[in-house]
Image (cartoon, rainbow, N blue to C red):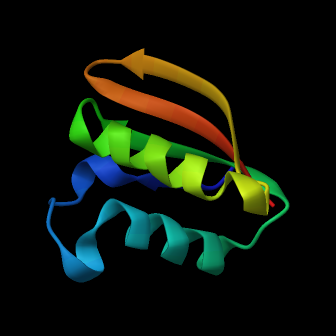
Amino acid sequence: MNELDLSKQPGGCGASTTSVSLMKFWLETGGNQEVRIIAQQGVQADEVEMWAMAMQEKGVKILKKEILDGKVIYNIYLP
């Protein structure tokens, strides 16, 4: 399973935003698969959820969400 660990990335704006990182990851890894996204609890996890909601009409789905050691781990389906 492909994985993107957002918790290791510095926050910011422009090219380093969570949504840009997610879109880039989707383009690089391709669709029609389940991926794991790791985010820090709080703002970063909220951004992952907002991105998934915004992309829902494209077929993106959060399949599983768990909190472990201050991080939120998502299993997300990318169409």
Asked whether, in this view, residue 70 is left or right of residue 38, the answer is left
Is 48 placed above or below 46 here?
below
- Furthest-right residue in this view: 32
- Residue 14 image point, x, y percent: 22, 80
Most foreground residue, 75 or 59:
59
User: In the image, what residue occupies the spot 80% across and 55% down?
Assistant: 33
- Residue 58 image point, x, y percent: 76, 63
Asked whether, in this view, residue 2 is left or right of residue 46, the answer is right
Is 72 placed above or below 61 here?
above
Which quadrant would the C terminus be assigned to in this image? bottom right
User: In the image, what residue occupies the spot 41% across and 18% down?
Assistant: 67
Tally of numbered tags: 0
Asked whether, in this view, residue 41 is left or right of residue 45, the answer is left
- Residue 55 image point, x, y percent: 63, 58
Residue 44 sits in which quadrant? Answer: top left
User: In the image, what residue occupies the spot 66% across and 43% down?
Assistant: 76
Is 26 placed above or below 79 here?
below
User: In the image, what residue occupies the spot 34% across and 53% down?
Assistant: 6
Asked whether, in this view, residue 70 is left or right of residue 60, the answer is left
